[in-house]
Amino acid sequence: MTRDKALVVFSGGQDSTTCLFWALKKFREVHTVTFAYGQKHSIETEAARKIAEKAGVDFHLADMGRIASVGKNSLTDSTIVMDSEKPEGGVPNTFVPGRNLFFLAFAAVYAREMGIFDLVTGVSQTDFSGYPDCRDSFIKSMNVTLNLAMDEQFVIHTPLMWLDKAGTWALADRLGVLDLVRNETVTCYNGVPGEGCGHCPSCRLRKAGLEKYLADRKSYMESFVPADCKSAGI
Ligand code: ZN
Protein backbone atom coordinates (compact mmCIF):
# COMPACT_ATOMS: atom_id res chain seq x y z
CA MET A 1 0.00 0.00 0.00
CA THR A 2 1.40 3.40 -0.96
CA ARG A 3 1.08 6.17 1.59
CA ASP A 4 2.08 9.07 -0.65
CA LYS A 5 -1.42 10.16 -1.63
CA ALA A 6 -3.99 12.02 0.44
CA LEU A 7 -7.57 13.17 0.21
CA VAL A 8 -8.38 16.51 1.87
CA VAL A 9 -11.90 17.19 3.12
CA PHE A 10 -12.08 20.66 1.68
CA SER A 11 -14.62 23.43 2.25
CA GLY A 12 -12.76 26.43 0.85
CA GLY A 13 -12.52 27.96 4.33
CA GLN A 14 -9.46 29.06 6.30
CA ASP A 15 -8.88 25.75 8.07
CA SER A 16 -9.26 23.27 5.23
CA THR A 17 -7.35 25.52 2.81
CA THR A 18 -4.43 25.59 5.25
CA CYS A 19 -4.72 21.80 5.47
CA LEU A 20 -4.70 21.51 1.67
CA PHE A 21 -1.37 23.33 1.42
CA TRP A 22 -0.04 21.35 4.39
CA ALA A 23 -0.96 18.14 2.56
CA LEU A 24 0.75 19.36 -0.61
CA LYS A 25 4.02 19.56 1.37
CA LYS A 26 3.57 16.17 2.97
CA PHE A 27 2.13 14.02 0.15
CA ARG A 28 3.14 13.48 -3.47
CA GLU A 29 -0.41 13.46 -4.76
CA VAL A 30 -3.33 15.34 -3.23
CA HIS A 31 -7.03 15.20 -4.03
CA THR A 32 -9.92 17.16 -2.53
CA VAL A 33 -13.56 16.46 -1.82
CA THR A 34 -16.00 19.29 -1.11
CA PHE A 35 -19.49 18.74 0.24
CA ALA A 36 -22.65 20.52 -0.76
CA TYR A 37 -24.92 20.02 2.27
CA GLY A 38 -27.47 22.72 1.69
CA GLN A 39 -25.28 25.64 2.78
CA LYS A 40 -27.11 28.95 2.37
CA HIS A 41 -24.16 30.25 0.40
CA SER A 42 -22.93 28.45 -2.72
CA ILE A 43 -20.05 30.94 -2.72
CA GLU A 44 -18.31 28.52 -0.31
CA THR A 45 -18.15 25.65 -2.77
CA GLU A 46 -17.25 28.08 -5.56
CA ALA A 47 -14.31 29.38 -3.49
CA ALA A 48 -13.23 25.78 -2.89
CA ARG A 49 -13.27 25.05 -6.62
CA LYS A 50 -11.14 28.12 -7.40
CA ILE A 51 -8.59 27.39 -4.67
CA ALA A 52 -8.30 23.74 -5.76
CA GLU A 53 -7.65 24.92 -9.31
CA LYS A 54 -5.00 27.37 -8.10
CA ALA A 55 -3.36 24.63 -6.02
CA GLY A 56 -3.35 22.31 -9.03
CA VAL A 57 -5.40 19.56 -7.37
CA ASP A 58 -8.58 17.94 -8.57
CA PHE A 59 -11.91 19.06 -7.17
CA HIS A 60 -14.77 16.71 -6.45
CA LEU A 61 -18.11 18.13 -5.30
CA ALA A 62 -20.28 15.62 -3.46
CA ASP A 63 -23.94 16.18 -2.69
CA MET A 64 -24.79 15.58 0.97
CA GLY A 65 -27.88 17.76 1.04
CA ARG A 66 -29.94 15.23 2.95
CA ILE A 67 -28.03 15.66 6.22
CA ALA A 68 -29.14 19.28 6.49
CA SER A 69 -32.78 18.45 5.89
CA VAL A 70 -32.89 16.03 8.82
CA GLY A 71 -30.68 17.94 11.28
CA LYS A 72 -31.98 21.47 11.78
CA ASN A 73 -29.31 24.17 11.99
CA SER A 74 -28.84 27.84 11.20
CA LEU A 75 -26.20 27.30 8.51
CA THR A 76 -28.69 25.67 6.17
CA ASP A 77 -32.06 26.98 7.39
CA SER A 78 -32.57 30.70 6.85
CA THR A 79 -35.62 30.72 9.17
CA ILE A 80 -33.37 29.99 12.20
CA VAL A 81 -31.64 33.01 13.74
CA MET A 82 -27.95 32.20 14.16
CA ASP A 83 -26.62 31.88 17.73
CA SER A 84 -23.93 34.46 18.29
CA GLU A 85 -22.59 32.68 21.37
CA LYS A 86 -22.36 29.09 22.54
CA PRO A 87 -25.47 28.52 24.68
CA GLU A 88 -25.06 27.37 28.28
CA GLY A 89 -24.68 23.59 28.35
CA GLY A 90 -25.36 23.01 24.65
CA VAL A 91 -24.08 23.42 21.14
CA PRO A 92 -24.75 26.55 19.05
CA ASN A 93 -27.36 26.19 16.32
CA THR A 94 -24.58 26.57 13.73
CA PHE A 95 -23.75 22.95 14.57
CA VAL A 96 -24.78 20.63 11.72
CA PRO A 97 -25.47 17.30 13.46
CA GLY A 98 -23.45 14.43 12.03
CA ARG A 99 -21.63 16.59 9.49
CA ASN A 100 -18.11 15.34 10.07
CA LEU A 101 -19.37 11.80 10.63
CA PHE A 102 -20.97 11.72 7.18
CA PHE A 103 -18.18 13.68 5.49
CA LEU A 104 -15.42 11.40 6.78
CA ALA A 105 -17.38 8.24 5.97
CA PHE A 106 -18.00 9.44 2.42
CA ALA A 107 -14.41 10.67 2.06
CA ALA A 108 -13.03 7.30 3.15
CA VAL A 109 -15.13 5.35 0.64
CA TYR A 110 -14.22 7.81 -2.11
CA ALA A 111 -10.53 7.73 -1.16
CA ARG A 112 -10.45 3.93 -1.05
CA GLU A 113 -11.67 3.80 -4.63
CA MET A 114 -8.61 5.84 -5.61
CA GLY A 115 -6.24 3.74 -3.51
CA ILE A 116 -5.90 6.53 -0.96
CA PHE A 117 -5.84 5.76 2.76
CA ASP A 118 -4.67 9.08 4.18
CA LEU A 119 -7.46 11.56 4.90
CA VAL A 120 -6.88 15.14 6.00
CA THR A 121 -9.43 17.26 7.84
CA GLY A 122 -9.15 20.75 9.34
CA VAL A 123 -10.97 20.15 12.60
CA SER A 124 -9.57 21.71 15.76
CA GLN A 125 -10.33 20.91 19.37
CA THR A 126 -8.80 24.18 20.54
CA ASP A 127 -11.30 26.48 18.85
CA PHE A 128 -14.00 23.93 18.32
CA SER A 129 -16.98 26.21 19.04
CA GLY A 130 -18.57 23.43 21.06
CA TYR A 131 -18.92 21.09 18.08
CA PRO A 132 -18.42 17.55 19.41
CA ASP A 133 -17.36 16.18 16.02
CA CYS A 134 -14.30 18.46 15.95
CA ARG A 135 -12.77 16.81 19.02
CA ASP A 136 -9.76 14.52 18.92
CA SER A 137 -11.70 11.72 20.66
CA PHE A 138 -14.29 11.69 17.86
CA ILE A 139 -11.64 11.65 15.11
CA LYS A 140 -9.76 8.77 16.76
CA SER A 141 -12.99 6.84 17.20
CA MET A 142 -14.01 7.53 13.59
CA ASN A 143 -10.60 6.37 12.40
CA VAL A 144 -11.06 3.04 14.17
CA THR A 145 -14.62 2.75 12.83
CA LEU A 146 -13.53 3.36 9.24
CA ASN A 147 -10.81 0.75 9.53
CA LEU A 148 -13.24 -1.79 10.96
CA ALA A 149 -15.95 -0.91 8.45
CA MET A 150 -13.74 -1.50 5.42
CA ASP A 151 -10.93 -3.63 6.87
CA GLU A 152 -8.38 -1.03 5.80
CA GLN A 153 -5.68 1.04 7.48
CA PHE A 154 -6.91 4.59 7.08
CA VAL A 155 -5.14 7.42 8.87
CA ILE A 156 -7.08 10.61 9.53
CA HIS A 157 -4.62 13.53 9.74
CA THR A 158 -5.68 16.59 11.75
CA PRO A 159 -2.85 19.13 11.48
CA LEU A 160 -4.88 21.85 13.21
CA MET A 161 -6.20 19.78 16.13
CA TRP A 162 -4.10 21.46 18.82
CA LEU A 163 -3.69 24.87 17.19
CA ASP A 164 -5.78 27.91 18.06
CA LYS A 165 -6.77 30.28 15.27
CA ALA A 166 -3.58 32.33 15.66
CA GLY A 167 -1.58 29.11 15.28
CA THR A 168 -3.54 28.22 12.15
CA TRP A 169 -2.65 31.61 10.64
CA ALA A 170 0.99 30.97 11.59
CA LEU A 171 0.88 27.63 9.79
CA ALA A 172 -0.62 29.26 6.66
CA ASP A 173 2.17 31.84 6.75
CA ARG A 174 4.83 29.16 7.15
CA LEU A 175 3.32 27.36 4.15
CA GLY A 176 3.56 30.59 2.13
CA VAL A 177 -0.19 31.03 1.68
CA LEU A 178 -1.11 33.67 4.26
CA ASP A 179 -2.43 36.12 1.63
CA LEU A 180 -4.29 33.43 -0.29
CA VAL A 181 -6.01 32.22 2.88
CA ARG A 182 -6.76 35.80 3.97
CA ASN A 183 -8.26 36.91 0.68
CA GLU A 184 -9.71 33.90 -1.09
CA THR A 185 -11.21 31.61 1.53
CA VAL A 186 -14.79 31.80 2.77
CA THR A 187 -15.18 31.14 6.49
CA CYS A 188 -17.98 33.64 7.17
CA TYR A 189 -21.36 32.18 8.15
CA ASN A 190 -22.93 34.94 6.06
CA GLY A 191 -20.99 33.90 2.96
CA VAL A 192 -18.78 36.99 2.65
CA PRO A 193 -15.32 36.03 1.28
CA GLY A 194 -11.96 37.01 2.80
CA GLU A 195 -12.33 39.14 5.93
CA GLY A 196 -16.06 38.28 5.92
CA CYS A 197 -19.00 40.14 7.45
CA GLY A 198 -16.96 40.81 10.58
CA HIS A 199 -19.70 40.07 13.10
CA CYS A 200 -20.77 36.40 12.80
CA PRO A 201 -19.15 33.97 15.30
CA SER A 202 -16.87 32.53 12.63
CA CYS A 203 -15.63 35.94 11.49
CA ARG A 204 -14.99 37.04 15.07
CA LEU A 205 -12.93 33.91 15.78
CA ARG A 206 -10.97 34.28 12.53
CA LYS A 207 -10.32 38.01 13.06
CA ALA A 208 -9.24 37.61 16.70
CA GLY A 209 -6.82 34.86 15.64
CA LEU A 210 -5.37 36.94 12.82
CA GLU A 211 -4.88 39.97 15.08
CA LYS A 212 -3.19 37.82 17.72
CA TYR A 213 -0.93 36.28 15.09
CA LEU A 214 -0.01 39.53 13.30
CA ALA A 215 0.72 41.28 16.63
CA ASP A 216 3.33 38.63 17.36
CA ARG A 217 4.25 37.47 13.86
CA LYS A 218 8.00 37.71 14.29
CA SER A 219 8.17 35.48 17.32
CA TYR A 220 5.70 33.03 15.78
CA MET A 221 7.88 32.76 12.68
CA GLU A 222 11.00 32.22 14.79
CA SER A 223 9.66 29.69 17.22
CA PHE A 224 6.42 28.24 15.93
CA VAL A 225 6.73 24.76 14.49
CA PRO A 226 3.65 22.57 14.91
CA ALA A 227 4.49 18.94 15.59
CA ASP A 228 3.10 17.82 12.25
CA CYS A 229 5.30 20.31 10.39
CA LYS A 230 8.46 18.73 11.76
CA SER A 231 7.65 15.37 10.24
CA ALA A 232 6.58 17.02 6.99
CA GLY A 233 9.79 19.07 6.80
CA ILE A 234 7.88 22.38 6.65
ZN1 ZN B 1 -19.16 36.56 9.00
Image (cartoon, rainbow, N blue to C red):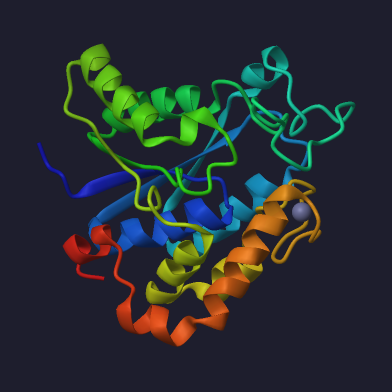
Reply above or below: 115 against 212.
above
Reply above or below: 213 against 57.
below
Reply above or below: 202 against 67.
below
Q: Residue at x 65, y 23 (%)?
A: 65
Q: Residue at x 26, y 64 (%)?
A: 229
- Quarter of the image with the C terminus is bottom left
- Residue 96 lies, in percent from the top left, at 63, 27
Q: Residue at x 32, y 33 (%)?
A: 111
Q: Residue at x 64, y 45 (%)?
A: 45
- Quarter of the image with the N terminus is top left
The residue closer to the viewer here, 23 or 75, is: 75
The residue closer to the viewer here, 149 or 63, is: 149
Reply above or below: 128 against 13.
above
The residue closer to the viewer here, 51 or 11, is: 11
The residue closer to the viewer here, 117 or 189, is: 189
- Residue 184 lies, in percent from the top left, at 63, 65
Residue lying at the far left in this picture: please name it. Answer: 1
